[in-house]
Image (cartoon, helix red, strand yellow):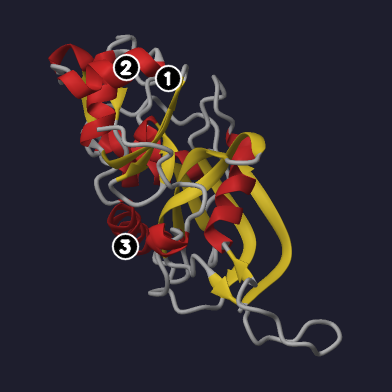
Amino acid sequence: MVVVTAVQLLPVPGVPLVPIGADLVPLVVTAVTDAGIGFEEHDIVVVTGKIVSKAEKRLVNLGEIEPSARAERLAAEAEKDPRLVELVLRESTDVVRVRPGNLLVRHRLGYVSAVAGIDRSNVSGDDDDALLLPEDPDASAAALRDELVRVTGLTHLGVVITDSHGRPFRLGNTGVAIGVAGMTAIRYLEGDPDLFGRPLTNASIVPVADLVASAAMLVSGEADEGIPLVVVRGLRLTEDPDGTRAADLQRPPDRDMFAIPDRDYD
């Protein structure tokens, strides 16, 4: 169960540009402390996947990428850099849609997103630099949480690593959780009673971690705000801290009606 009083979204200003290979824990602790926010039991520390990827040295320069013939074909159709498309293919298991300006794929981690979540904005001053998502975001979240618990001495801390995804039927991007630790990522309410005592159906699923990620995005932004760190306070985590992961939020491919390739892209 999640107990909510009033939820606060506390953006952490003054986070420096994260260098490649940086140790995130002292950076996070210093930034949260210097902002006067501090840490409290049941806080959720929300960090963007971008700074986690930088810490994990997931930077690739497109100048080092030799595009395959398949990448060249898809790049021409998508009107994108063939080197980027080659990198997308290496990070993906399936190509779902290709249109001018769009390349939608199933990432190796299971979710469907544009250009495999590869980021070229706010990465560095080199236009050829591209940042891959963390290798294993759930493991990254668990490692970060363990260190924060050790350093702060607190027990009930959650960590959510975020990315931004588009949606099939709605304009714009929203925040999603790609890594979760110390909190339940998803709640299944099937069988729970509604206001009139009727049991809820198997469609009654609450993506708790995605809701946290999306709420944090309201104050972190996606452009030049420079706020990759948000503390969410007031959402008491009464579940098992070793519960579900962000990976559990993925819809299985055989139940995903919107991610079936519309043709053979090989």
Compared with 174, 59 (above or below) is above
What secondary structure is found at the residue carrying circle 3?
helix
Compared with 82, 209 (above or below) is below
**In the visual, does 243 lie left or right of 176?**
left
The residue that mark 3 highlights is 146
Q: Decide which of tag 2 and tag 3 comes sooner along the chain.
A: 2
**Which residue is most to the front?**
263
Type of the residue with mark 2 = Ala
> Closer to the observer: label 2 or label 1?
2
Label 2 environment density (alpha carbons within 10 Å; few <14, some 14–19, many ≥20):
many
Compared with 40, 222 (above or below) is above
| CA gap, disc 3 and disc 1 | 30 Å
What secondary structure is found at the residue carrying circle 1?
loop
Residue 110 location, x and y as percent? 35, 52
| CA gap, disc 2 and disc 1 | 19 Å
Label 1 environment density (alpha carbons within 10 Å; few <14, some 14–19, many ≥20):
some
Residue at image position (47%, 18%) is: 101
Type of the residue with mark 3 = Asp
